[in-house]
């Protein structure tokens, strides 16, 4: 096994996860006023279509990755074969990935070409959109690469990698990525890089869950007396 492969797919994932967790925690604790989506809708309300397409697509893509990569082979094999699971991933990933891509391109075009939006955009706002675009295009390209091995062998290796990371098996994770194609390696690398930059961008709003809202004090609303 090469040292670079061990570094990128055995060690880097844990660095990325550590940065994701610790930096997000520190930002939420020290800079809560920056913890927001930073919507630019008030500046120019022309993002509804592309925003909806992007969010619908990305939600289903993330759910598919989570279930597909972290479900052990012994469990899903009771319901679907490896080959059929790969075909399902290719079809659903292609559909929702394309939906997401259309929305993302629209949002990126708006961010880069609208003078008012560009003027109020931070470097991180623009950076995260470009990284998301690269990652999404790489993900769609893996679909074409997957047509060359419909036996599901690469999907099993990717699942082994993800599950090995979750169970802290560094050598097993790096070994699983050793033989997969470069397009898959790039897709995984940029996915991990998104975790690294996540705490420093507007993406933090993804993990905002206002649980304290359920325990807030009641608001007193008085009806105006017109008599």
Image (cartoon, rainbow, N blue to C red):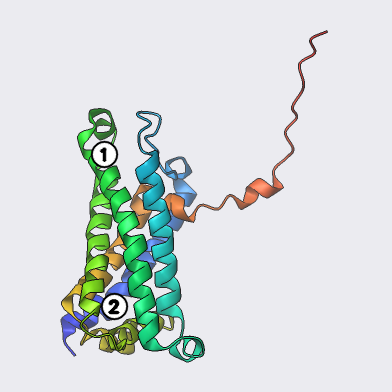
Secondary element type, mark 2: helix
Residue that appears at 64% across and 46% down? 213
Which element type, helix, strand or loop, lies under badge 1?
helix
Q: Nearer the viewer, residue 40 or 32?
A: 40
Q: Nearer the viewer, mark 2 or mark 1?
A: 1
- Residue 121, percent from left and from top: 28, 37
Does residue 38 show up?
no
Residue 98, above or below 30: below
> In the picture, residue 96 is in which quadrant?
bottom left
Residue shown at 27%/61% (left/top)? 136
x, y percent for residue 222: 77, 23
Compared with 148, 53 (above or below) is above
Horizontal arrangement in the rendering, residue 104 relative to residue 78 (left or right): left
Q: Residues within 10 Å of mark 1 (few under 14, many from 20)?
A: many
| Residue 45 quadrant | top left
Instruction: Specify which label sits upstream in the sequence, 2 or 1.
Output: 2
Tell me the distance, in whole angstroms, between the alpha carbons under discs 2 and 1.
35 Å
**The furthest residue to the right:** 227
What x and y, as percent, mark residue 187?
25, 69
Q: How many marks?
A: 2
The residue indicated by pointer 1 is 111
Q: Are marks 2 and 1 in contact (CB under 8 Å)?
A: no
* Residue 126 seen by the camera: yes
**Residue for badge 2:** 11
* Of 181 and 221, the residue lying toward us: 181
* Image-based side of 208 in relation to 88, left or right: right
Residue 80, percent across and down? 46, 86
Q: Crowding at label 2, few (<14), some or many (≥20) Cα neighbours within 10 Å?
A: some
* Residue at image location 24% in from the left, 32% down from the top: 114
């Amino acid at each position: 096994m090469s040292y670079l492969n061990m570094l990128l797919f055995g060690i880097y994932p844990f660095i990325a996860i550590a940065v994701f967790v610790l930096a997000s925690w520190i930002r939420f604790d020290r800079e809560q006023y920056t913890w927001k989506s930073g919507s630019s809708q008030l500046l120019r309300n022309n993002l509804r279509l592309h925003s909806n397409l992007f969010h619908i697509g990305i939600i289903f893509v993330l759910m598919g990755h989570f279930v597909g990569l972290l479900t052990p082979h012994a469990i899903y094999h009771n319901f679907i074969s490896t080959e059929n699971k790969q075909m399902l991933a290719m079809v659903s990933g292609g559909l929702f990935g394309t939906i997401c891509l259309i929305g993302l391109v629209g949002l990126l075009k708006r961010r880069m070409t609208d003078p008012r939006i560009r003027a109020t955009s931070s470097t991180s706002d623009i950076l995260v959109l470009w990284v998301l675009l690269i990652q999404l295009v790489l993900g769609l390209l893996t679909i074409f690469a997957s047509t060359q091995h419909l036996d599901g062998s690469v999907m099993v290796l990717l699942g082994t990698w993800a599950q090995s990371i979750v169970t802290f098996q560094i050598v097993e994770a790096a070994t699983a990525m050793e033989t997969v194609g470069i397009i898959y390696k790039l897709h995984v690398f940029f996915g991990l890089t998104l975790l690294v930059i996540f705490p420093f961008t507007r993406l933090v709003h993804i993990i905002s869950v206002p649980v304290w809202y359920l325990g807030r004090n009641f608001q007193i609303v008085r009806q105006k007396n017109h008599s």
